[in-house]
Amino acid sequence: MKAQKYTRSVAINMVIANMIGTGIFTSLGFQVDPVYGIPDGFAILVIWILGGIIALCGATVYGEIATTINKSGGEYAFLTELYHPLLGFISGWVSILVGFSAAIAMLALAVGKYFLPLIGAESEAMYLGVEVSNLIAFAVICLVLLIQLQGVKVGGRVQNYMTAIKLGLILFFLLMPFIFGGNYEPSNNHFGPDGDSWNTILSLPFAGSLVFVLFAYSGWNASTYIVGSLENPRKNLPFSLIVGTLIVTVLYVLLNLVFLYVSNFEDLAGQLEIGNIVAYKVMGGKWGLVFTSILSLALISGVNAMFIAAPRVVQEIGKDYTLFERLGKESKNGAPKLALLVIFAIASIMVFTVPFNELLEFTGVTLGIFALLTVLGVFILRSRKKRSENTVKSFAYPLTPIIFAGFSLWMIYFFASMKPTVLLWLLILIAPAVLLYYSSGRKNSEPNEKLLDESAIENNDNDEVDA
């Protein structure tokens, strides 16, 4: 029986849904913080545009790497092939615990916070000694797990519908200040540059705020996790990466314009539910309640998208390592059930144990480091002169990987200087992965046969395209 494959539309929607989630509706509150933030309208717009450029640079490089290696699993598969199986295993371990499980927990927690007004509960409301928002978050994770257990076809269809709803709501959000223009007094924020703006852009806090932006943009590589299960990956993978990232970049810049046009820095500083604050100010209590409740449901599409991508990493590790062999098995409907349950269990524990802001910083830095290693791997790939018949070359090489690496290193330098404990926790997380690697027994030690020597495909050069 022919294996079921994800379509191009699912791949694009995975990118959009993975990107549009917790970050855009929570990051601004941290960015306008008077101590560690950049409370300047022009600087904030610049950093969101810059985040889109960095994501696009990463996306085009990932397109080349993914179509050459042509394996599901994202950074796990790429770093294994590019560097060493140990680094790939560490990346997979970190992806499972942080890149996906923590991100799923954050998205679910954000949904819980946004959903509270619908049931008339306060932000700190408790039930049986547990915050109500945490219980809602756990219910969201359970719901998405049940959807994904139905298989590839059902999970992909639900993803398309939910992403369409989310995009519709965001478009309405962008028009909301003009539709309800008479109901509120706009903020006094200005968006033109001044002397302080340029100083802010060149400051370390700008680099620190970049972690929130890059976290919001994380997900631009989402479709690379399913490249092995994607129809015609040579065309559909780079298309989904570039188109999805471009759409989200435009939406992010416009959304931040709306947020800052409606609300002052003082209203937003340190706040998690940015969407609620803006919607309530513009629409008033009744309609603001309706809109933010619907928006909270739409954010579930991000959880669903991560539940599609995350098990593929677990599954690939299970194929390569004896200790995790059972995780690699799929059911007849294409759902890696045991892998789904592993992700569900880890995310559920995090929902009840780790504060949101700590998850956000740690996840942003961790994802940035492994994405940096992957992007730098394109230089290794080209030095080996290895490509596959499906390779799609990255656009504007070597400028795009250099831009991505430069800004990623700047962000990492901020945390090494200002918040070194974040990097320390990463080292602590890596330690058990090293022990597991040497005790798990790698089964697949052969290089990817799809990586062919240059001479073997030199007659196919005319078939290559740029991402």
Image (cartoon, rainbow, N blue to C red):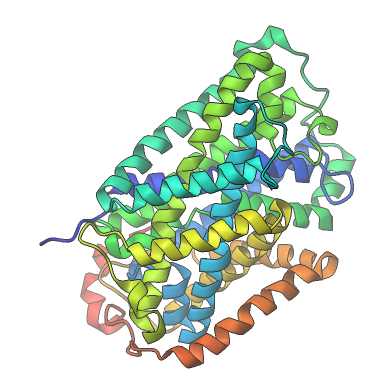
Q: Splitting the image into 4 quarters, where does residue 313 fall?
A: bottom left
Out of 28 and 39, give the one closest to the viewer.
28
**Horizontally, is 445 left or right of 405 in the view?**
left
Percent position (x, y) of residue 338?
A: 37, 66
Q: Is 390 drawn above or below residue 147 in the view shown?
A: below
Residue at 60% across, 18% down:
176
Residue projecting furthest to the front: 128
Q: Quadrant of the C terminus?
A: bottom left
Q: Quadrant of the N terminus?
A: bottom left
Q: Is 433 drawn above or below residue 12 in the view shown?
A: below
Percent position (x, y) of residue 87?
A: 52, 82
Q: Is 443 drawn above or below residue 82 in the view shown?
A: below
Q: Splitting the image into 4 quarters, where does residue 243 fall?
A: top left
Percent position (x, y) of residue 65?
A: 41, 69
**Horizontally, is 355 left or right of 148 in the view?**
right
**Horizontally, is 44 left or right of 177 in the view?**
right
Residue at 68% across, 16% down:
285
Out of 240 and 418, give the one closest to the viewer.
418
Residue at 34% across, 76% down:
326
Q: Is 235 drawn above or below residue 23 in the view shown?
A: below
Percent position (x, y) of residue 439?
A: 48, 92
Out of 405 and 369, give the one closest to the viewer.
369
Residue projecting furthest to the top: 182
